């Protein structure tokens, strides 16, 4: 079960039922909403949906962008040259990991893995994730 | 204490069989609560904290299965009512006619999402190349100690962030221009990750699915030098069930 990675070429790509990781933002954030008093909020979930929306424009973000741009090797004509290293550094410490962190963090918290991850995770992981959400929530309150 | 977990609303006249287990565990059966022309898809649930990953997946599976054979208005994840009577009295009865109308409107249509992602490296490279001011500042800051260039680096980052945002707006406009004419409705959601360029939901007639897919394929080629596309669906109309209700509230 995979998302249609729409590619170029002669064929027409078709949409397919996607992995949970691909629709999690839609499921958490969309759909008919009942009046608040009949809803039971789930541990962590309210926080997660808020987290996922935060893409901050702050000094921190700016500094990370600057760092990422500084690291670009603008002379390189071969695009693949030095790219893995660059991407790694951006991913680890740069703008990407910071701003991407929210939704990725949400996925991690929910025990949802990569694109094609399917079906149940191991129990311990699940339990740990819900505990983390809980402590997180109380921190925030 | 148990409650009633609500997945979605369908028309009572459409046959829906959901075999996927519901929220709460593998033995949870999904059933219907019928009121007038509406059928609510529900299952019993123990009131208390749900296990997020498992229950999110169950919610999603139930709706996927139900929507494969019928029109279903998805309800937001985590919606639990006291019992069947409360479901009818507080939700189905007061909104009966509007929900029936909305189901009729969405009948025969599916939601398709198109998410576009930037390759951060290519994106930033283009930004630097496209702006002499950024290129100059970048050269000035480069290789100098961080502490000595703190404010310049903030300025550089701010300029870059601004350019990135403008690129995003342009690319979103392009995606909407290409795909919106083929859809009944479209919604451009805010990107939620830093590499996310466009995050758009389209409501498309089932009969037009192939045409829409062809347009997505063409768009993929058109932007492949700078963006990666993900084409997701068909989904129940999550993004289009929402607005009407919000307006009633």
Image (cartoon, rainbow, N blue to C red):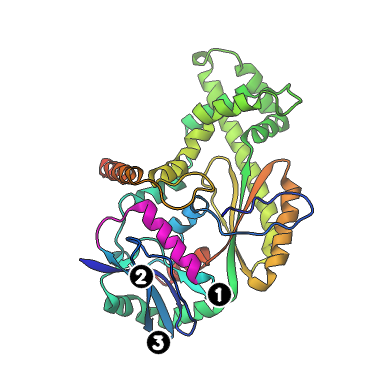
Q: Is residue A97 visible?
A: yes
Residue at 37% x, 45% y is: A122
* Residue under pointer 2: B29
Magenta part of the chain: B47-66
The image shows residue A70 at horizontal and vertical percentages of 61, 22
Mark 3 belongs to which subunit?
B
CA gap between label 1 and label 2 equals: 26 Å
Viewport quadrant of the C terminus of chain B: bottom left
Q: Secondary structure at mark 1?
A: helix
Residue A67 to residue B177: above or below? above
Q: Name the one closer to the observer, B195 or A43.
A: A43
Residue at 20% x, 66% y is: B1
The image shows residue A47 at horizontal and vertical percentages of 36, 48
- The residue mark sitting in front, 1 or 2, is 2
* Residue under pointer 3: B36
Residue at 45% x, 53% y is: A119
Q: Is residue B178 visible?
A: no
Disc 1 crowd rating (10 Å Cα; few below 14, some 14-19, many 20+) is: many
A83 relative position to B63: left or right: right
Mark 1 belongs to which subunit?
B
Name the image quarter holding residue B187.
Answer: bottom right
The image shows residue A20 at horizontal and vertical percentages of 49, 53
Residue A50 to residue A37: above or below? above
**Magenta stretch containing residue B65, yes or no?**
yes
Residue B82 to residue B224: above or below? below
Q: Main secondary structure of the magenta part?
A: helix
Q: Secondary structure at mark 3?
A: loop
Question: Closer to the N terminus: mark 1 or mark 2?
Answer: 2
Q: Name the one closer to the observer, B194 or B162.
A: B194
* Residue under pointer 1: B106
Question: Closer to the N terminus: mark 3 or mark 2?
Answer: 2
């Amino acid at each position: 079960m995979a998302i249609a990675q729409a590619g170029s070429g002669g064929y027409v790509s078709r949409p397919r039922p996607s992995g949970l990781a691909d629709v999690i933002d839609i499921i958490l954030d969309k759909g008919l909403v009942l009046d608040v008093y009949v809803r039971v909020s789930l541990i962590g979930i309210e926080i997660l949906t808020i987290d996922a929306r935060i893409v901050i424009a702050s000094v921190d973000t700016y500094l990370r962008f600057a760092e990422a741009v500084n690291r670009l090797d603008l002379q390189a004509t071969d695009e693949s040259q030095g790219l893995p290293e660059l991407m790694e550094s951006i991913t680890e410490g740069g703008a990407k990991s910071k701003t991407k962190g929210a939704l990725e963090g949400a996925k991690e918290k929910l025990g949802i893995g990569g694109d094609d991850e399917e079906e149940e995770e191991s129990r311990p992981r699940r339990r740990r994730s819900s505990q983390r959400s809980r402590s997180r929530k109380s921190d925030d309150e | 204490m148990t409650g009633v977990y609500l997945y979605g609303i369908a028309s009572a006249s459409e046959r829906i069989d959901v075999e996927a287990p519901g929220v709460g565990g593998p033995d949870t059966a999904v059933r219907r609560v019928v009121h007038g022309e509406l059928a609510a898809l529900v299952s019993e649930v123990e009131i208390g904290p749900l296990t997020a990953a498992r229950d999110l997946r169950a919610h999603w599976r139930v709706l996927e299965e139900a929507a494969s054979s019928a029109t279903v208005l998805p309800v937001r994840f985590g919606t639990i009512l006291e019992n069947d009577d409360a479901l009818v009295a507080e939700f189905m009865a007061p909104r009966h006619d509007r929900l029936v109308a909305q189901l009729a409107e969405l009948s025969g249509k599916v939601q398709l999402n198109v998410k576009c992602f930037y390759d951060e490296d290519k994106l930033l490279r283009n930004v630097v190349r496209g702006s002499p001011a950024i290129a100059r500042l970048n050269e000035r800051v480069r290789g100098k100690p961080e502490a000595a260039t703190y404010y310049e680096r903030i300025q550089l980052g701010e300029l870059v962030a601004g350019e990135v945002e403008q690129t995003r707006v342009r690319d979103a406009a392009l995606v909407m221009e290409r795909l919106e004419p083929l859809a009944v409705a479209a919604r451009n959601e805010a990107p939620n990750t830093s590499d996310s360029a466009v995050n758009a939901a389209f409501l498309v007639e089932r009969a037009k699915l192939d045409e829409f897919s062809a347009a997505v394929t063409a768009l993929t080629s058109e932007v492949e030098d700078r963006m990666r596309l993900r084409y997701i669906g068909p989904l129940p109309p999550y993004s289009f069930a929402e607005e009407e209700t919000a307006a009633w509230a």
